[in-house]
Image (spheres, grey):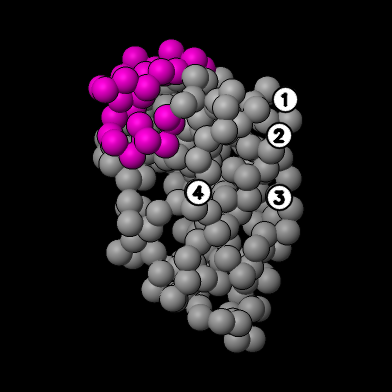
Amino acid sequence: MELLPISKAEAARYMGVKGEPDSAVAELLDRAEKQVRETLRPKYVYLETDMTVTDGGVLLSAMSEPLTGEDIKRHMKGCNKAVLLAATLSQEADKLIRQAAVTDMAYSLALDCICSAAIEQVCDRAEEEIFAREAATYRTWRFSPGYGDLPITLQRGFLLALNAQRRIGLTVTDSSLLIPSKSVTAVIGISDSPVERGRRSCAICTMKDSCAYRLSGSICKK
């Protein structure tokens, strides 16, 4: 997948910029976006699976362990299928950020934030492509391990179900951090009847205390 123009406004907000970035920040973001788009070739994999919601959690046919927590149970209520998704910008993204940090921390930060905006673009486009191929009358938005009370330790189960290490080089550490770091795993519920697709709640977001959007007095687009 080739990256399309990356939202520099979103990247600026990740940097903590309020309002329009000044000329120095805008120049850093322009440079970073150009390098990222020229260098990175993101990848994603997905799997459709049957599912049921029980008192013990959300049971997916593709996974041996349930998705536990009240938030995911509410999120998947009324769904009978799900899509597991994993996407990554690749190890090259981490390499770009790390190399820039040796000589220019400001540019390294710009790269980091452009990459954060880029992986969101990849997930949005992956979702569009998936559901252009897969029948889904209604669907939920993406819900990732670590969001709300869904344990982040489920990352490993997601990757195993998707065979993500072999297919796109995505692994997870013992502390449940994805490697490469600019990567996402998520589950999307599918239903034959309308499902609630309201805005994601800041109250249950694990980033609520350090979120760049909230610190700048705004909210994310999701």
Q: Amino acid at mark 1?
A: Arg
Q: Which corner quadrant holds the N terminus?
A: top right
Q: Earlier in the sequence, mark 3 or mark 1?
A: 3
Residue at image x 40%, y 54%?
201
Please tell me how crowded label 3 is: few (under 14), some (14-19), or many (20+) other residues with Cα within 10 Å: some
Residue at mark 4 to residue at mark 2: CA–CA distance: 22 Å
Q: Amino acid at mark 2?
A: Glu
Q: Nearer the viewer, residue 189 or 144?
A: 189
Numbered badge on residue 198: 4
Instruction: Give the quadrant of residue 203.
Output: bottom left
Q: Are marks 1 and 2 in contact (CB under 8 Å)?
A: yes
Look at discs 3 and 2 and give the one toward the viewer.
2
Residue, disc 1: 133
Please tell me how crowded label 4 is: few (under 14), some (14-19), or many (20+) other residues with Cα within 10 Å: few
Residue at image x 68%, y 71%?
30
Residue, disc 2: 129
Q: Are marks 4 and 1 in contact (CB under 8 Å)?
A: no
